[in-house]
Amino acid sequence: MLNTDKLLTLLKFDEANPLLFNTGLFLLLFCGFILIYQMMRKYRVAKMTFVILFSLYFYYKSSAEYCFILLGVCISDYLLGILLGECRRNWERRGVVWINVVMNVGMLIYFKYLNLLYETFCNFASKDFDAFDIVLPAGISFFTFRSISYIVDIYRRQIEPCRDFLSYTFYLTFFPPLLAGPVVRAKDMLPQIESNPVADRAMVSEGLFLIMCGLVKKVVVADFISQNFVDRIFDNPSLYSGFENVMGIYGFIIQLYCDFSGYSDMAIGIALLLGFRFLDNFRAPFKSQSPTEFWHRWHISLSTWLRDYVYIPMGGNRCGKFRRHVNLMTTMVVGGLWHGASWMFMIWGSLQGIFLVGHKMLFGASKKNRDLEKKASRWRIALNIFVTFNLIAFSFMFFRARSMSDIGDMATQIFTDFHPEVAAQFIEGYLMIVLVIIGAMIFHFLPTDWSDKAKKGYSKTPLLVQALVLAIVIFIVIQTRQSDIMPFIYFQY
């Protein structure tokens, strides 16, 4: 017999149990959603309204009444976009842009950074710090960035204002990228919305393939190594040898990549099932031969957003070397702070800026130098990849560690208590962790055309075989899943 009270409780907002792609509740709701969506595919307005309502419910399950903030941003963007389209004087157009930027950045400052700023002030003023009771709406950084890019693109005359409120609301609330990206831009998605797309067989197959890849990355790799190894190291680094701390750092960068790229894969895959195509957000970043290449492969939607809406407006490459390096450094610090209200993120962003500036100062940023990197010998390529991976991995200590004290403990263990002789004992004690990490890295370094062939091969198989493979992957994910559902790391940003 159906327990109505239990069902209603399950469907209501629960801060401890948000609606995530890797939960059974989402699977059940999405099956019902996709069935109704297909029934409405010929009725554009009804279909869009249904998707918007589902998207708002999806957001409600993670942020409760803050879904009204999302709706408020939709309304303000729509009105400001139309107003911007009507303005003729440059100062009027700039004024509209500034209204949008101040509103969005103001929200970020209030929800994400007010306590950090207040704590910093109290520390300088030697006052007691009593944090404000502010709840951070999920995904606020992602939808505010989409909002800013929409208005700025209208100002730059790259797109026309959207005069269909339903279409713009669909764009900003669309649930696959809502909570953790990719940062989808209006100029890429609004034309798709207007065309009322229908997913064909190839898109559905590709979408299912990406969803399976995302689930495996998230549950089988990221969650497994996090709960069984990485969290233990970062929670108490002084209890472990320097060798184990280094392994923990390597484990975290792999966990973070699999967690975040897994979400992106699932978001892109779900969008494909609905007929929408997003750009790639990750392109095998650990194959990078330099910090510059790394940021061309890692969180591409954010790095290109920062380039187009922070770096270029500050002057970009259109000024002298010193100013160019300052612009690049500032952009990466902004990118670091975007991740959260912590000076640790600022340090992490500063390190990324130092790496980028250092690489450009030592090797230049010309196409000729990039071509030389591609034509380097295998040993040189391997050395470049090794150095880049280690620079990036160790910089992410600041991304994961809770405080500079923990960073100090990890550095102390690594430089004064390394004990490489524990390697054999480590492998024996964490055999499954080691195998999962090695397996993940092997798949990561496989040639790109291999994964493309696997995707095409899956698309060409009969539907029954595709369903069987999907069932096997879901079974493996269920068997591997930890007792507690782990939210995606970028869910908090």
Image (cartoon, grey):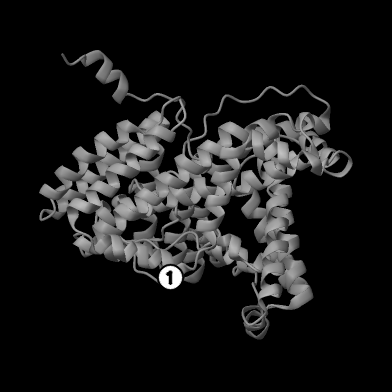
Q: Position of residue 260 (x, y in %)?
A: 50, 48
Name the residue at 46% across, 43% down.
Answer: 218
Name the residue at 29% across, 49% down.
Answer: 469
Q: Quadrant of residue 23?
A: top left
Q: Residue furthest bottom?
A: 368
Observer-nearest of 201 and 305: 201
Label 1: which secondary element: helix
What residue is pinned by disc 1? 449
Q: Position of residue 99 (x, y in %)?
A: 50, 53
Name the residue at 50% across, 57% down.
Answer: 443
- Indicate left or right for 413 with 150 as reference: right
Q: Mark 1, residues whose alpha carbon is within 10 Å: few (<14), some, or many (≥20)?
A: few
Number of labels in the image equals: 1
Q: With respect to residue 16, does 270 lie above or below?
A: below
Q: Position of residue 470 (x, y in %)?
A: 29, 47
- Indicate left or right for 493 with 316 as reference: left
Q: With respect to residue 313, does 71 lie above or below?
A: above
Q: Quadrant of residue 449?
A: bottom left
The amino acid on which the numbered mark 1 sits, given as a three-letter code, is Asp
Would residue 252 be seen by someone viewing this image from the given angle? yes
Observer-nearest of 472 and 196: 472
- Indicate left or right for 356 with 447 as reference: right
Quadrant location of the N terminus?
Answer: top left
